[in-house]
Amino acid sequence: MLAMSEIPYNITDPFASTLRTFLDHARAIASGKVEDDDGFSWFLATEYQWEVEAACEVLVESPADQVTHAEKAALNKFLADMPAVRDALKAFKKNATGAATASAAREWSDWQDVSTLPAWRDFSIRTAVLLSQLGKAAQNDGDFFAGHR
C-alpha cells in the first residue's frame, strides 16, 4: 500500500537546482557580499567555494542542450583553479585561528581579512568572468530569475 501512495513533495529538476545553487553562490562571491551584505569570513568563504566547485562539477557533466561546449570549457578552466583557492583558504584559516589575538568568534569577524587575500580577490574576479560566460545556462533557469525580480 505504501508503494502506491503519492510522494508528498515535488521533485525538482537536478540541473535547475544545481544551476540555481551555482548562480546564488557565484554571484555572492563575485560581489563580495553574502547574506545581509556581510563579507566573507574564512568559514563562509570555504563553504561558498565548496558549493560553487561542487555545482561546477555537475554542470560540466550536463547535456549539451543545457550547457554549451564553450560554457563547459569555461567551467573546466575555472575548476582547474579550485585547489589553489582551497589551499589559500586553509592557510588563511590556520593563520587566523592560530594568532595570539584571535577571539573565540574569529571565524565570523575576519571577513575584512578574507577580502584582502590575493587568492580570494583573484577567485572573485574569475567567478565574475565565468558568470559572464554562462549566458545560455543562466537563460535556461527561468525559475532563478522569477524568484529574484
Image (spheres, helix red, strand yellow):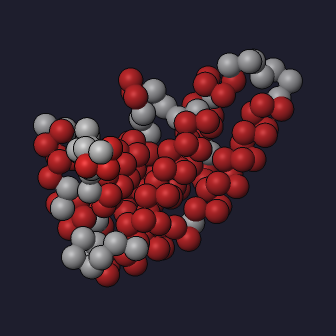
- Could you tell me which quadrant the C terminus lies in? top left
* Quarter of the view holding residue 114: top right
What residue appears at the point 64 percent right and 54 percent down from the top-left corner? Answer: 86
What residue appears at the point 46 percent right and 54 percent down from the top-left corner? Answer: 52
Q: Position of residue 82 (x, y in %)?
A: 58, 62
**Which residue, as the protein is rendered here, is positioned at the far right?**
100
* Quarter of the view holding residue 34: top left
Tell which of 80 and 124 is nearer to you: 80
**In the picture provided, is 27 more to the left or to the right than 140?**
right
Q: Position of residue 29 (x, y in %)?
A: 44, 45
Is residue 32 among what the camera can see? yes
Q: Position of residue 125 (x, y in %)?
A: 44, 55
Q: Is residue 98 above or below residue 18?
A: above
**In the picture provided, is 120 more to the left or to the right than 65?**
right
Is residue 135 among what the camera can see? no
- Could you tell me which quadrant the N terminus lies in? top left
Total numbered badges shown on the rendered structure: 0
What residue appears at the point 13 percent right and 43 percent down from the top-left corner? Answer: 146
Q: Is residue 56 above or below residue 92?
A: below
**In the picture provided, is 143 more to the left or to the right than 30?**
left
Tell which of 46 and 58 is nearer to you: 58
What residue appears at the point 46 percent right and 74 percent down from the top-left corner? Answer: 76
* Quarter of the view holding residue 14: bottom left
Tell which of 66 and 68 is nearer to you: 66
Q: In this view, does 70 lie above or below 3?
A: below
Q: Where is residue 121 in the image (x, y as percent from the top left)?
A: 53, 49
